[in-house]
Image (cartoon, rainbow, N blue to C red):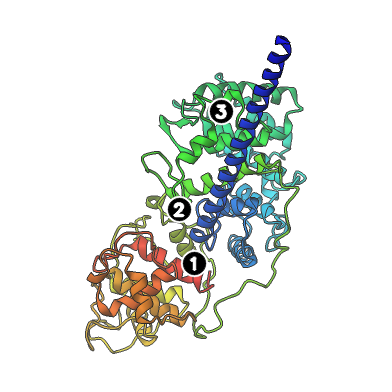
Amino acid sequence: MQTICKRGMGLFLALILALSMIFPVAAADASLDDAVNGSAAYMLKTVANPQVGSIGGEWAVIGLARSGYDVPQSYWDNYYTTVEEYVKACDGNLHDKKYTEYSRLIVALTAIGADPTDVADYNLLTALGDYDKTIWQGLNGPIWALIALDSGNYKMPVNPNAKTQATRQMYIDRILECQLPDGGWSLFGGTEAATAGYDTSDPDITGMALQALAKYQDQPAVAEATKEALICMSEMQGSDGGFSSWGTANLESCVQMIVALCELGIPLTDSRFVKDGHTMLDNLLTFRQSDGSFLHTADGSGSNQMASEQGFYGLVAAQRAAEGKSSLYRMDDVTIRVTGSTGTATVGLPGKDAAVKKQPITAPGTTFDDISAHRNQPAIEALAARGIFNGKGDGLFHPGDTMTRAEFAATVVRALGLAPKAVTQFSDVDSSAWYAGYVGTAYTYGIVTGKSETAFDPSGTISRQEAAVMVARAAKLCGMDTSLNAGTIRDILAQFTDYVKTSEWAREGLAFCYQEGILDSAVLEIQGSIAIARCEIAQMIFNLLGSAELL
């Protein structure tokens, strides 16, 4: 009898334990779903017009496409049109040496159900048939070549111009031969290009290497390398469940290892990767902000947008694993969203002025050394690729510099595709000045006014409230309704602590810009009289063109 009671009690306790495991998991899944949906909403808002690029481009597209979040069809169509324009402008040559440019785009196109073998009559896969060029930039090359090729189960392309025709096995072997003695990988470790600092495994690169090798676990050498790498990463994992790279705990290292485990089919709750009760997913969520964005490091340093995009697709990978779906990069389940040049992407709003024209990409890949990881980098690069914004003659953009009234006039005229034509309205605008035509056209279309009837003050700076008013005038030319009643203006601006300090004449323009997302409404103050920086104007123009369907 005592034995029966003990056995019954044991079964009862087992049942309680089982139930206690079931309900927390359900709660965790619900919490994960909420986190994915919240971050997807944030991504759709902040990357409303994805470009071809590693920030504000493919990673946001991949995350949204694989999340299952409800995204308007126009989003995919407009992105594909941008890709076509970019590829055309490059004549199919995305980069001479960084072949991850091809791989990243292939993965994104596969994720949205588009065909990367026929983009503006170019086959983007062909580049990955060149072994020497693909491996030039270190391990990222072969890693992402494999991920890209396997995302859609594509055949290895034949590259007639390659010195060495690549095979999948060559890329696998390249990754294996670069494995470090400690079991993981670093960007250049294990190669002739290795330098001091690359002889210790890096969680980012190790995670990506594992993602690339995930489909080849039937090869004994791959399986053994994977086993060693997992031991290495388990030992490197911190007590908070996260990872450090170059001595700094960061989100990206954690994300790459999350995706790696999901690609390998290993639960995130695997005992090897639970430290002091913390999983990698627990760690990832500590970087997540209430608005759905992510921080790069716990102290908030680094590029929030870059971290947000990686954090988002890390959540998506975890969610797909929890739901038993195919992994982030195994895309056999993809829904066809675009089938080529659909013609459905609109070019401008119905009410736009006939003179306003969408600006094509003419200088793809344009960037500046001083905007790397800058929060406005996607906007600056998108405008520079279209000739709307330029550097300052030294190869730099100087994002924090102010902008003159003449420079602003030139930027907005170029953004709208208006033809420069000088006027004689202003005595301080010499007809031979480089900006004369831009000032004349901006004045003619009512975008800018003078400081007086006869003076423009071309060298004067632009304040934030002046920029808002001028951008609102440009928006009206683009077909947007910029009129707001007094109550709406008050309601929009009342959220800012200093709105009463703004000029009365500027409030409608400011309210419009905040309402349309041209200005960031998440800030606490407007600071209307402060001179606006070049990077801020770039973001405003970029947001305007996106809202006006001119990107």
Is 197 placed left or right of 81 in the picture?
left
Amino acid type, residue under disc 3 in the picture: Trp
Measured from the top left, where is residue 485 in percent x and y?
A: 38, 82
Residue at numbered disc 3: 185
Measured from the top left, where is residue 183 in percent x and y?
A: 58, 21
Is 485 placed left or right of 133 in the picture?
left
Is 487 placed left or right of 455 in the picture?
right
The alpha-carbon separation of the residues under discs 3 and 1 comes to 38 Å
Residue at numbered disc 2: 291
- The answer to whether mark 1 and mark 2 are in CB contact below 8 A is no
Q: Quadrant of residue 347?
A: bottom right
Closer to the N terminus: mark 2 or mark 3?
A: 3
Tell me if residue 118 comes above or below residue 145 in the rendering. Answer: below
Query: At 60% across and 40% down in the image, what residue appears?
Result: 141
Query: At 52% across and 49% down in the image, what residue appears?
Result: 309
Measured from the top left, where is residue 396 in percent x and y?
A: 36, 55
Which tag is nearer the camera, tag 1 or tag 2? 2
Residue at numbered disc 1: 386
Instruction: Count residues near mark 1 (Cα–Cα under 10 Å), then give few for <14, some for 14-19, many for 20+.
Output: many
Instruction: Count residues near mark 2 (Cα–Cα under 10 Å), then give few for <14, some for 14-19, many for 20+.
Output: few
Amino acid type, residue under disc 2 in the picture: Asp
Q: Nearer the viewer, residue 268 or 187?
A: 268
Circle 1 — which element? loop
Q: Nearer the viewer, residue 82 or 35?
A: 35
Q: Nearer the viewer, residue 77 or 501?
A: 501
